[in-house]
């Protein structure tokens, strides 16, 4: 049986957060690609096959919900989780654009659990 490492695209405007989360998820055997903007995140999303998208809500060139909507134009099934320090009032917008979950920064155990649930769930 082949061992396939799940691939995650993490889009966040803070380089230190990208570095920390990438390292944390690597210890859980995830391969993580990172981007700091909608433009670079969308380019990676369109060119790679990912098992999960992890998005921040505030990006330098727009909002994470905008990126979520753009991803859903070409990928209807890959799970999307928002990982943000913004107030959970944004949760409805995140779910409306096609996200499955929301984890509040800096909750790392909750983030790992949400990613595991999303990747383990059968895809539609």
Image (cartoon, grey):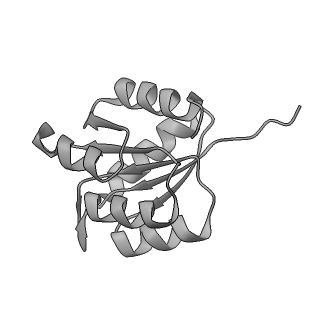
Q: Residue at x 51, y 66 (%)?
A: 74
Q: Is 111 placed left or right of 23 in the picture?
A: left
x and y percentages locating residue 81 in the rendered image? 38, 43
Residue 99 quadrant? top left
The residue positioned farthest toward the front in the image shown: 124
Q: Position of residue 75 (x, y in %)?
A: 52, 59
Above or below residue 102? Residue 98 is: below
Q: Residue at x 56, y 35 (%)?
A: 119
Looking at the figure, which quarter contains the C terminus? top right
Q: Is residue 70 left or right of residue 7?
A: left
| Front-lying residue, 6 or 89 | 89
Q: Nearer the viewer, residue 53 or 18?
A: 53
Which residue corresponds to the image point at 26% horizontal and 49% vertical from the top-left?
96
Looking at this view, name the residue that lies furthest to the right. Answer: 1
Q: How many marks?
A: 0
Q: Is residue 50 left or right of residue 97?
A: right
Above/below status of 57 relative to 70:
above
Q: Is residue 52 above or below residue 15?
A: above
Check the picture and name the quadrant holding the N terminus. Answer: top right
Q: Quadrant of residue 5?
A: top right
Q: x%, y% of residue 88?
A: 14, 38
Q: At 42% from the left edge and 43% from the top edge, which residue is drawn?
A: 21
């Amino acid at each position: 049986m082949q061992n396939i490492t799940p691939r995650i695209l993490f889009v966040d405007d803070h380089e230190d957060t990208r570095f920390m989360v990438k390292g944390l998820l690597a210890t859980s055997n995830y391969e993580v690609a990172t981007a700091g903007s909608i433009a670079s995140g969308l380019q990676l999303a369109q060119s790679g096959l990912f098992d999960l998208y992890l998005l921040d809500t505030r990006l330098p060139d727009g909002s994470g919900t905008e990126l979520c909507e753009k991803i859903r134009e070409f990928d209807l099934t890959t799970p999307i989780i928002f990982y943000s320090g913004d107030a959970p009032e944004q949760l409805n917008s995140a779910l409306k654009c096609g996200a499955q979950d929301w984890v509040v920064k800096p909750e790392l155990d909750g983030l790992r659990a949400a990613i595991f649930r999303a990747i383990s769930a059968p895809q539609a």
